[in-house]
């Protein structure tokens, strides 16, 4: 079914309360509203209304096995959606909310079962964006909101990304400008003993361990099979993917440069277009390369890389490249609060294809994929 998607500009510093009121009414009526959060844009529906929540799955073409995060205006609302809430939540909320942390708790009966895709748990967060906060406050409902993209596409960090994927499928987009973090929230399951990190994100692991010292976190990106009854079904390998296949190259700048210069002429000869996602510092290595060169941001500044990563993947897609090569970043020396999240998103965008730049099979693989 096609609907007309209305777009309202809402300045985060000068909130248009009339637009917020219309969007809040839409949510109350069981309709879909996309809104900015500090991480990525979310696609919201009333979390207490089964039919409204079903519309999210339909609009996104999301599998009915992947549960949604419920967004609250403030931590005091938690009792509406969760029960047997452990004491540590108060401390976590005081430190990280509003902000990019999602907690998996025991689900209260009021929450529509499809929010949690039948599980007896519920994921909850209080977003920090002023537009999200105004909307959640105005509608007074808990709002289920996955990222506002088509399933398995890179998450949207601008209203235009939302429209590119979902125009005609949702009712309203609140355009509050580009999001600042650009990567989704960190998801922690507090229903397990000890607690488990299900998705690295905007809040880093070191900060979390100050309040959750026994938090279990996988050393490498968590990968689950599509059929598996997994703790976090969102941890599918193919996720955040642009249309063109992505290959990650690991190695020093020179090894990567050599690999790219071996591959590029062969691809060119075959009429294939190569997209290259490289840190700013290495742009000069590629000035005469026959490829679409897109900036990953400054290698030393993971905040900037995180903010634009999904936008850059979408940009390469719109250039129509046949294959994308990206440099791994955020590993080892450049590690910082966002490094786990950035490595995770790049790894999934590449569907797990990580090659050593000096691997002689790199060329072969790139030619097979392109
Ligand atoms: O930053 C964010 O978290 C954004 C903004 C819009 O808030 N939302 C977001 O939602 O990224 P989504 O649906 O794209 O990702 C939700 C993640 C998935 O990995 C899902 O499997 C996990 O949270 N999740 C949700 N409910 C869960 C539950 N009850 N148990 C385990 N994992 C859950
Ligand atoms: Mg998502």
Image (cartoon, rainbow, N blue to C red):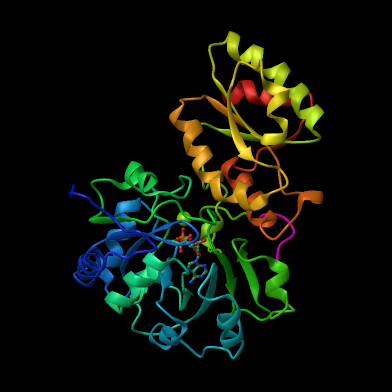
Q: Residue 354 is drawn in which quadrant?
A: top right
Residue range corresponding to the magenta coloring: 216-222
The percent coordinates of residue 256 (x first, y second) are 76, 29
Tell me where residue 153 sits by quadrant. Answer: top left
Question: What's the residue at 57%, 49% (across, down)?
Answer: 237
- Write down the quadrant of residue 297 in the picture: top right
Instruction: Say whether residue 2 is left or right of residue 13.
Output: left
Relative image position of residue 339 (x, y in whole percent): 69, 54
Q: Residue 209's x, y, as percent? A: 72, 75
Residue pictured at 39% horizontal, 71% vertical: 133
Extreme-front residue of the structure:
14
Quadrant into which the C terminus falls: top right
* Residue nearest the observer in this picture, 43 or 180: 180
From this view, report whether residue 67 is shown above or below residue 284: below
274 left or right, relative to 107: right
Residue 243 at least partly seen: no
Residue 86 is at least partly visible in this image: yes
Secondary structure predominantly adopted by residues drawn in magenta: loop
Q: Is residue 143 above or below residue 300?
A: below
């Amino acid at each position: 079914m096609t609907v007309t998607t209305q777009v309202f500009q809402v300045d985060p510093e000068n909130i248009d309360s009339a637009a917020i009121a219309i969007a809040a009414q839409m949510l109350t009526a069981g309709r879909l509203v996309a809104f900015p959060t500090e991480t990525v844009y979310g696609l919201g529906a009333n979390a207490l209304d089964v039919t409204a929540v079903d519309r999210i799955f339909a609009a996104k073409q999301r599998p009915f096995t992947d549960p949604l995060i419920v967004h609250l205006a403030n931590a005091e609302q938690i009792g509406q959606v969760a029960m047997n809430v452990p004491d540590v939540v108060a401390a976590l909320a005081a430190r990280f909310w509003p902000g990019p942390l999602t907690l998996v708790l025991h689900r209260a009966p009021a929450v529509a079962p499809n929010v949690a895709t039948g599980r007896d748990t519920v994921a909850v967060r209080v977003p920090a964006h002023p537009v999200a906060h105004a909307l959640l406050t105005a509608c007074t409902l808990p709002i289920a909101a996955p990222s506002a993209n088509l399933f398995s596409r890179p998450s949207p960090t601008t209203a235009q990304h939302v429209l590119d994927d979902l125009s005609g499928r949702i009712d309203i987009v609140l355009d509050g400008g580009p999001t600042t973090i650009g990567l989704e929230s960190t998801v922690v399951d507090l229903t397990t003993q000890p607690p488990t990190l299900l998705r690295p994100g905007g809040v880093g692991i070191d900060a979390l361990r100050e309040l959750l010292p026994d938090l279990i976190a996988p050393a490498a990106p968590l990968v689950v099979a599509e059929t598996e009854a997994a703790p976090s079904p969102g941890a599918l390998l193919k996720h955040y993917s642009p249309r063109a296949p992505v290959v990650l190259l690991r190695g020093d700048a020179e090894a990567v440069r050599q690999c790219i210069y071996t591959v590029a002429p062969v691809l060119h000869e075959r009429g294939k277009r190569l997209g290259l996602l490289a840190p700013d510092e290495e742009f000069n290595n590629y000035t005469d390369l026959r490829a679409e060169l897109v900036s990953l941001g400054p290698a030393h500044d993971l905040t900037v890389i995180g903010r634009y990563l999904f936008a850059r993947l979408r940009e390469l897609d719109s250039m129509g490249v046949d294959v994308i090569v990206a440099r791994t970043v955020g590993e080892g020396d450049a590690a910082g609060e966002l490094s786990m999240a950035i490595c995770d998103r790049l790894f999934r965008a590449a569907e797990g294809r990580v090659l050593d730049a000096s691997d002689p099979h790199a060329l072969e693989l790139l030619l097979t994929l392109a």
